[in-house]
Amino acid sequence: MKKYRCTVCEYVYDPEKGDPESGIEPGTPFEDVPDDWVCPICGVGKEDFEPVGK
């Protein structure tokens, strides 16, 4: 599963870890994260994330 980086604060969403504090279980691909989820560091939406690497 691909990691995604916040273009504002550089936070990296790792699907293997998820974001349990926001209710996103480990193993959740970024594509399956709800559209209203926001970056846990700076609060921007999914539209401000980009894939990491290839």
Image (tube, helix red, strand yellow):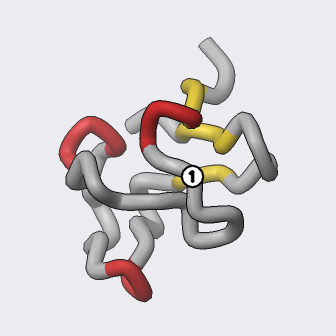
* Front position in the image: 33 or 1: 33
Does residue 41 show up? yes
| Quadrant of the snapshot with the N terminus | top left
**At which x and y percent is residue 31?**
26, 36
In the rendered image of this protein, does residue 21 appear above or below residue 9?
Answer: below
Residue marked by disc 1: 44
Residue furthest toward the top? 54
Residue 38 left/right relative to 34: right
Circle count: 1
**At which x and y percent is residue 22?**
37, 79
**At which x and y percent is residue 8?**
76, 43
| Quadrant of the snapshot with the C terminus | top right
Query: Which image quadrant is residue 40 in?
Result: bottom right
Residue 51 left/right relative to 34: right
At 47% from the left and 47% from the top, the residue drawn is 45
**At which x and y percent is residue 47?**
46, 32
* Front position in the image: 15 or 39: 39
At 65% from the left and 51% from the top, the residue drawn is 12
Query: Which image quadrant is residue 48 in?
Result: top right
Residue furthest toward the right? 9
The secondary structure type at the circle numbered 1 is loop
In the rendered image of this protein, does residue 32 appear above or below residue 28?
Answer: above
Does residue 33 show up? no
Residue type highlighted by circle 1? Val
